[in-house]
Amino acid sequence: MPPLPRPGLLDIKPYRGGVSDAPGFDAPIKLSSNENCFGCSPAAITAMHDLEQKVERYPDGSVHLLREALAAKHDLDVERIVCGCGSDELLQLLGKAYLRDGDEVLLAQHGFLSYKLIAWQNGAVPVTAPETDMRIDAAAFLSKVSKRTRMVFLANPNNPTGYLMPGEEVRKLHAGLPEDVLLVIDGAYAEFVREEDYEGGFALVSQHKNVVATRTFSKSYGLAGLRVGWAYCPDEVAAVLNRVRSPFNVNAMAQAAALAALDDMAFLQKCVDHVAKWAPWIEAQINALGLKAFPSAGNFVLFGLQSPDEADALETFLSARGLILRGMRGFGLPGYLRMTVGTKEENKAVIAAISAFVQQ
Ligand SMILES: *Cc1c(COP(=O)(O)O)cnc(C)c1O
């Protein structure tokens, strides 16, 4: 008998990222993974160049410079910040550390794909809370809490729906959870949020022992390829994460680039302002073409077509023109596509192509 993995692991469908090629195009326009259309801060590139000669050294396993900078910037306790190889690693580690066989993991009906994988990897069962027209509230989540619920994942803003749960609802959700249930607030798109009443989780983390807030350098900072994320945790959770993570989980290039990026607020502001202008433009254009786009608080827009077949046809039509969007079948949304906000020219090219598709 060959070695056997834990039961259930081979039943998992591996995560598939956004498509990155369009046959026949050397440089297609890739708007399938919510990446930053402006790249990253030039200061981050310089920081990586400066490090080129020193890669024989191990990185700082405690990531202290970056953690200090994050603590100062967000006015947080540095001891409660844990960095990871992308925020996804931290979500994975939380699953490993806190889930037991048979536990339930609660997520939104169209929540981020990783959350289900994390449940399955740890012998837990994903349970979904119903959305209405791509929106969700605290009551919908709380209606699905059972004695077995161990973790609740909330992406706020959510990917792929773009929905932002108001701060008051987030606090209501937390208040309704038993104390031994961990609420994980995934703020992958937090920097793009413009609403006043935003609960990204930091305030809840400082007051309670059962909330974790995660952030990433992958989206608004444009460093997805380097893999840097971080979590703000209660002391006890930070102590656990620091025991289960690998000792050098954030590499030296990633630390240097993230630190420099954090210092370049002009670049971040440029990206955030661009998305604030173009996400509503894309939404309006798509609606004007008779399709249904959903308002988004992130750097992407979800929209629906008449049928799954029509959505597949549009994805193919766009790909044949070098334009890559994300078909949503894998997210349980056949009939929908998601478009990342691109540059002005990219956005106009996609809308022109969708217009040609609709009129053909
Ligand atoms: C992109 C994304 C992440 C993953 O971010 P990394 O830091 O690159 O691992 C996490 N959550 C949501 C909702 C995302 O869209």
Image: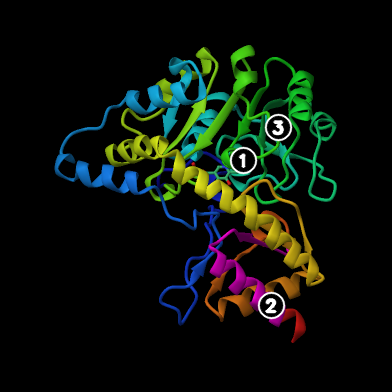
Asked if the stretch drawn in magenta spans residue 255, the answer is: no
Q: CA distance from mark 3 to mark 1?
A: 27 Å
Whether residues under marks 3 and 1 lie with C-beta atoms below 8 angstroms apart, the answer is no
Tell which residue pokes out farthest to the bottom in this image: 360
* Marks 3, 1: nearer the viewer: 3
Question: From what the image shows, is residue 200 above or below residue 306?
Answer: above
Label 2 amino acid?
Ala
- Location of mark 1 (residue): 115
- Location of mark 3 (residue): 196
The secondary structure type at the circle numbered 1 is: helix
Where on the picture, by quarter, is residue 118? Answer: top right
Q: Is mark 3 within 8 Å of ligand 1?
A: no
Front residue of 121/189: it is 189
Q: Earlier along the polypeptide chain: callout 3 or callout 1?
A: 1
- Location of mark 2 (residue): 313
Label 1 amino acid?
Tyr
* Local crowd size for mark 3, using a 10 Å CA cut-off: few (<14), some (14–19), many (≥20): few
Which region of the structure is painted magenta?
Answer: 334-356
Residue 267 spot, x, y in % from top left = 45, 46
* Local crowd size for mark 1, using a 10 Å CA cut-off: few (<14), some (14–19), many (≥20): many
Q: CA distance from mark 2 to mark 3?
A: 39 Å
* Marks 2, 3: nearer the viewer: 3
User: In percent of the image, x 56 and y 80: which residue is there?
Assistant: 321
Front residue of 63/263: it is 263
Q: Ligand 1 lies in which image quarter?
A: top right
User: Could you tell me if residue 237 is visible in this image?
Assistant: yes
**On the rendered image, what quadrant is the C terminus found in?**
bottom right
Asked if the stretch drawn in magenta spans residue 337, the answer is: yes
Q: Is 139 left or right of 42, judged from the image as shown?
A: right
